[in-house]
Image (cartoon, rainbow, N blue to C red):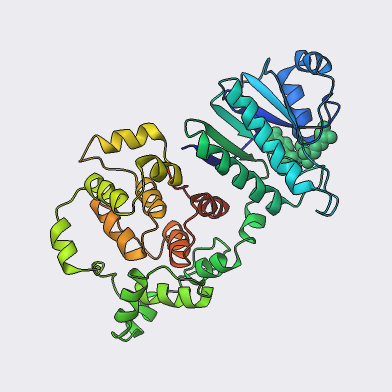
Amino acid sequence: MPFQLIHGDITKIRCDAIVNAANESLLGGGGVDGAIHRAAGPELLAECRTLGGCRTGQSKLTKGYRLPADYVIHTVGPIWQGGRSGEPELLCSCYRTALSLAAENGLETVAFPLISAGAYGYPEQEAQRIAVQTIAAFLETHPDMTVTLVIYDGTPDRRRSWYPEISELLDRAGKSGSGQSGSAFSGAQKAAKPRRRLFRNMNFAGAVRKETADTAAEIAADAEYCMAEPMPAAVPASLKEELLHADESFTQMLLRLIDAHGMTDAECYKKANIDRKLFSKIRSDIHYRPKKATAIAFAVALELSAEETEDLLRRAGYAFSPSTPFDIIVLYFIKTGNYNVFEINEALFAYDQVLIGA
Ligand code: AR6
């Protein structure tokens, strides 16, 4: 997976380079900087002394010494001063210069902490947004690199508060992990649903992209209809189309859709956050059975509707279940027309779900 988000301690990560959230002196400090110097040993400080410091928004490279990572890229994030002193541009520049330095030195796997989001006071959600966007933009031109954003804090609750609509949907499904018992879609409720709601169910499964986002309540209501009755087979856009492609395997359907959407293979796998090597494997094996998260990543890259996504999933032997958090979150993004795989992964990460891509 070219981009991933994980929880952990960056000093433990084995990769070509980890990035340090340093200060302009490059002579060490607290937070992740202190942890990296402690783990790397005194030789790191000795090399840092030879570098003559580093300006805010810039990056410098040293060896990793006793760290599992081969190198450390030291970058200096901006101190948060309210957001009007060029902080977003400087923070972007940290990620860009660090990644460029890695690429220039042939380093392919790089792990970042959330620069500036600790002692330097950058609001965490905004800091993460800039990190993800800048890394995603860089990977557009460097698809063979793998970049990991390492989140240190243990409690996901704060991140969940960034997604009030998704939290509401999961609460209704009894899947928020907030201690609520029972499901909003309990057997008694299912039994009480009138059959006509099946029509709504089919609307949900066949939702087309919308210009504007539905409210969480509307989506939840649709999801509820889905649970009211077993989800029917998705209704094909056209019967003729279905007959033409009835026997297609996952690979065959994927390649046909890439062509039909006027995309190149590279555009598709990059947008799906799929590794080029995995794509080649899928391309060369018409019976390839991807993981569900991989199949969904392609559906997102192709901007398929919920119905089309179900069809593609079926070719790999999967279905959506409106009672699992992963599916509820993915369907939320598809239904609201947000096909940004990186944003979807941020939300999945906030709820401790598997990320999409591979
Ligand atoms: N692994 C991953 N992330 C970590 C770790 C770790 N071991 N430890 C902390 N974090 P900060 P800044 C996270 O304060 O805001 C230093 O004194 C932490 O939760 O380390 O850029 C420097 O010398 C937070 O999300 O860096 C500078 O003077 C993120 O790393 C100043 O702090 C950054 O927090 C830089 O401040």
- Quarter of image, res 306: bottom left
Query: Which of the two residues, 358 or 9, is positioned nearer the viewer here?
Result: 358
Q: Residue furthest front?
A: 262
Q: Is residue 303 above or below residue 46?
A: below
Q: What is the total number of numbered labels drawn onto the structure image? A: 0
Quarter holding residue 131: top right
Residue visible at 30% across and 58% down? Answer: 319
Which residue is painted at 41% across and 72% down in the image?
223
x, y percent for residue 350: 58, 53
Rendered location of residue 263, percent (x, y): 36, 48
Q: Is 207 rendered above or below residue 163?
A: below
The picture places residue 153, in percent across and down from the top left corner, at: 68, 45
Q: Nearer the viewer, residue 345 or 131?
A: 131
Q: Is residue 80 visible?
A: yes
| Residue 11 visible to the viewer | no
The percent coordinates of residue 265 (x first, y second) are 35, 41
Q: Along the horizontal axis of the image, is 28 left or right of 157? A: right
In terms of depth relative to the viewer, which is nearer, 321 or 55? 55
> In terms of image quarters, where does ligand 1 lie?
top right
| Viewer-closest of 174 and 44 | 44
Quarter of the C terminus within the rendering: top left
At 15% from the left edge and 66% from the top edge, which residue is drawn?
240
Judged left or right of residue 50, residue 330 is left
